[in-house]
Image: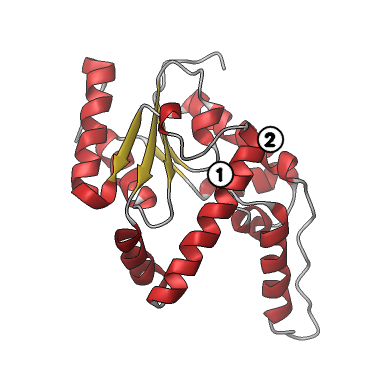
Amino acid sequence: MTNTSNIVITISRELGSGGAYVGQQLASRLDMLYVDRQIVSKAVQQLKVMEEDLEYRDETRTSFWQSVLQRCANSLPNLDGYSPPLPVSLTDEEFYKAESDVITRIVLENSAVIVGRGSSYIFRQYPRHVSVFLHADLAFRNQRVQELYQVSAGEAKKLIEKIDKERSHYLNAMTGRDWANSRYYHLAVDSGSIGLERTLDIILAYVKARFGAGVSIR
């Protein structure tokens, strides 16, 4: 990267710890671009594959999500003889490279808050980077997942275990890092113990302390 004037905040998170909410609020308060699923659309344009293929792979290994895609495709109704095409098959490495390229281009032009996508590793040597890891106890996460996805407590627990495991395996394979190791982040915050609003305040205070007058908080 040649432009290092923009600020990038990356958020890694356990499922149900509030990563998307905190990321959106940070972007709003700091007047930055919020980057999450829009990365998917840009990467799809670059690679010319179906959006669902990237979306369902959200930081997970190929095998599990490929089976999910197949089940989703098979469950769609056949309207007027039309069968939806299956996504082009790409390796995990190709997906990670595509998303890395898109994310890097975004930060060349914008200060941004990026949730997931292995972004903390991508920007590990970028000077104006704040990396955050959000975690919380299982009870807090379970309750949020139940509310967000309208599932039972048992289903939420299984989903948390599955997604965390797959996300960890994927990021370890792509970056060689233990995703949950706090030493790889500037901030590791237990959002369950202090709540999402206090979590947001802590991150904003850190960003202000790091970059001073160059940061305007709404």
Residue bearing mark 1: 39
Query: In this view of the protein, which residue sits in the foreground, 105 or 203?
Result: 203
Q: Which type of secondary structure does the marked residue at label 1 adopt?
A: helix
Q: Which type of secondary structure does the marked residue at label 2 adopt?
A: helix
Q: Residue at x 66, y 60 (%)?
A: 65
Q: Residue 205, relative to residue 28: is it above or below?
A: above
Q: Residue at x 71, y 66 (%)?
A: 67
Q: Is residue 42 left or right of residue 179?
A: right
Q: Residue 74, relative to residue 194: is it above or below?
A: below
| Residue 93 figure quarter | top right
Q: Residue 124, relative to residue 190: is it above or below?
A: above
| Residue 143 figure quarter | bottom left
Image position, residue 40 (x, y; %): 59, 48
Q: How many marks?
A: 2
Q: Give the amino acid at mark 1.
A: Ile
Q: Is residue 216 visible?
A: no
Q: Residue 68, relative to residue 151: is it above or below?
A: above
Q: Give the amino acid at mark 2.
A: Lys
Query: In this view of the protein, which residue sits in the foreground, 212 or 79?
Result: 212
Image position, residue 12 (x, y; %): 44, 41
Mark 2 and mark 1 lie on one chain; the one further toward the N terminus is 1
Residue bearing mark 2: 97
Label ID, residue 163: none
Q: Is residue 158 left or right of residue 54?
A: left
